[in-house]
Image (tube, rainbow, N blue to C red):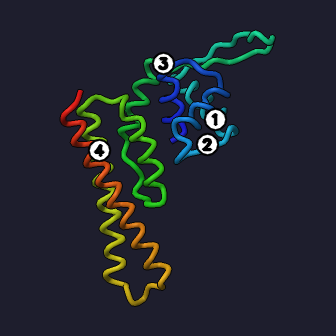
């Protein structure tokens, strides 16, 4: 997800490594907080594969600054990363889905429809799995497990409602 967030931030304008982290915090900080130490290797990987380019420039303070820009290849990579299938792991689902949905404005109307459908399908699958656990193992579950599973089912239900709203808005807009 880090590469996706970096490419999305760079799709808006050129940034230094410091400002990349700042804009990731501002755009994605509610559900993803990559460390500064993770950003430099990700920038290096993206530059190595041709998704971004860098240029060095002396700042007003006399320090050397490196500015990163997304390339044409990077714009295609961003699109690919947004549309790439999410992990089936429920633990990663919400944060990764939220990052992808936050980047949906980069996609065409049809690509958004595909993204929303894929994420909604996975959310429904995860909700169904949680409901099955409650229905099949209710007496074996502790009070705390039941509360957490009930909350999980509510979170998935709310998320599915949001996705249905996004689908409806996408179908009527652009």
The spot of residue 52 in percent (x, y) is 54, 22
| Picture disc at residue 71 | 3
Residue that carries the numbered disc 1 in the rendered image? 39
Distance from the alpha carbon under mark 4 to that under mark 3: 26 Å
Distance from the alpha carbon under mark 1 to that under mark 3: 18 Å
Residue drawn at x 63%, y 26% as measured from the top left: 19
Question: Which residue is situated farthest in the bottom direction here?
Answer: 139
In the rendered view, does 163 fall on the left or right side of 57? left
**Crowd tier of the residue under label 1, counting other residues whose Cα lies within 10 Å: few below 14, some 14–19, many 20 or above:** some
Residue that carries the numbered disc 2 in the rendered image? 34
Mark toward the start of the polypeptide (1 vs 2)? 2
Depth check, mark 2 against mark 3: the one in front is: 2
Distance from the alpha carbon under mark 4 to that under mark 1: 28 Å
Depth check, mark 1 against mark 2: the one in front is: 2
Look at the numbered discs 1 and 2 and tell me whether their residues touch, using CB distance below 8 Å: yes
The spot of residue 20 in percent (x, y) is 60, 29
The spot of residue 5 in percent (x, y) is 51, 35
Depth check, mark 4 against mark 3: the one in front is: 4
Residue that carries the numbered disc 4 in the rendered image? 116
Mark toward the start of the polypeptide (4 vs 3)? 3
Mark toward the start of the polypeptide (1 vs 3)? 1
Q: Is residue 133 above or below residue 79?
A: below
**Crowd tier of the residue under label 2, counting other residues whose Cα lies within 10 Å: few below 14, some 14–19, many 20 or above:** some
Mark toward the start of the polypeptide (4 vs 1)? 1
Secondary structure type for disc 3 = loop
The spot of residue 42 in percent (x, y) is 60, 34
Mark toward the start of the polypeptide (2 vs 3)? 2
């Amino acid at each position: 997800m880090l590469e996706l967030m970096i490419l999305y931030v760079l799709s808006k304008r050129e940034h230094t490594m410091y400002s990349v982290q700042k804009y990731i915090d501002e755009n994605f900080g509610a559900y993803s907080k990559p460390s500064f130490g993770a950003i430099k290797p990700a920038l290096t990987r993206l530059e190595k594969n041709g998704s971004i380019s860098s240029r060095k420039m002396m700042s007003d303070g006399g320090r050397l600054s490196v500015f990163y820009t997304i390339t044409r290849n990077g714009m295609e990579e961003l699109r690919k990363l947004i549309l790439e299938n999410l992990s089936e792991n429920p633990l990663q689902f919400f944060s990764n889905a939220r990052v992808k949905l936050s980047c949906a404005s980069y996609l065409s109307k049809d690509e958004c429809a595909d993204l929303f459908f894929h994420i909604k399908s996975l959310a429904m699958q995860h909700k169904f799995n949680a409901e099955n656990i409650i229905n099949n193992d209710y007496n074996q579950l502790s009070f705390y497990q039941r509360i957490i599973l009930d909350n999980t089912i509510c979170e998935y239900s709310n998320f599915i409602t949001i996705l249905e709203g996004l689908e409806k808005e996408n179908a009527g807009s652009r």
